[in-house]
Image (cartoon, grey):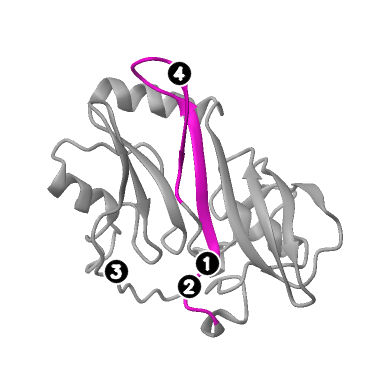
Amino acid sequence: MMEFDYQPPDVPLSILYQDRSLIVADKPPGLLSVPGKLEGRADCLETRLRLAYPGTLLVHRLDCDTSGVMIFARNKAAQGFLGQEFEQRRARKTYVARVLGRMEADAGQVDLPIGVDWPNRPRQMVDPLNGRNAVTDWQVINRSDSETRVRLHPLTGRSHQLRVHMLSLGHPILGDPIYSDDAKAYPRLMLHAETLSLHHPDTGAWTTFSAPCPF
């Protein structure tokens, strides 16, 4: 199992939107979404939000190293509604990533099942036998000879899905401490949750929240 040195960033909360039913935050890279199981990992976005906004309830997660849009509920009814938006795959997410190498095609889809790489947890891997269905659409934003900026649309929500799928294409996300050899050359994982779209729990209106990409 891989070691993980947790050094949560000392930065203020970045609230993108709030009303009586939900609160949307821009999670910084390096901060857990929820408390970790081991000692010293209690600090997380969920805990910080609960201190500032008592009653905040978890709906979904982002990887510790990923930044960007996260939505939380402010009451049980909203939590149940938003949970269904994710479970029924009505929620739509886009991410921006910088990946190694020049991707020649302009767009594509990765449809490869993902499972846990047990000896190397928390690492995941493409697993045709025991993996769970995982699908990612991607489009190139721009490219150079050494790297490509892509917009990623996960159609499923597997752990480390975008990281494993880009690696499977031979273009690992830059700065990835788990799946890339060059992590120390970058200040962070170059993966950002740019937009989240879903139905609002009060009105049913299709709503999009966004956080500008910081890299």
Query: Mark 3 is on which residue type?
Result: Pro
Q: Which of disc 1 and disc 2 is earlier in sequence?
A: 2
Left or right, 45 with reference to 141: left
- The CA span between labels 2 and 1 is 10 Å
Q: Residue at x 41, y 61 (%)?
A: 64
Circle 1 is placed at which residue position? 215
Query: SS for tag 2?
Result: loop
Q: Position of residue 172 (x, y in %)?
A: 67, 68
Question: Can residue 62 be seen from the camera position used here?
Answer: no
Q: Determine the CA span between mark 1 and mark 4.
A: 31 Å
- What label does residue 26 carry, if any? none
Q: List x then y, in percent, for residue 94.
A: 58, 45
Q: Secondary structure at mark 4?
A: loop
Q: Amino acid at mark 1?
A: Phe
Q: Which secondary structure lies at badge 3?
A: loop
Give the Cα separation between the discs numbered 2 and 4.
35 Å
Mark 2 touches mark 1? (CB < 8 Å): yes
Q: Which residue is mark 3?
A: 8
Q: From the image, state whether disc 4 or disc 3 is nearer to you.
A: 4
Q: In this view, which residue lies farthest toward the right?
A: 104
Q: What range is drawn magenta here?
A: 186-211
Above or below 18: residue 165: below
Q: Could you classify mark 4 by the number of other residues whose Cα lies within 10 Å: few (under 14), some (14-19), or many (20 or more)?
A: few
The answer to whether 117 appears left or right of 84 in the picture is right
Q: On the picture, is 17 further left or further right than 20?
A: right
Sequence-wise, the earlier of marks 2 and 4 is 2
Q: Is residue 117 above or below residue 6?
A: above
Three-letter code, disc 4:
Ala
Mark 2 burial class by Cα count in 10 Å: few <14, some 14-19, many 20+: some
Q: Is residue 208 magenta?
A: yes
In 3D space, how far apart are the residues under numbered discs 4 and 3 (Cα atoms)? 35 Å
Residue 48 shows in the view? yes
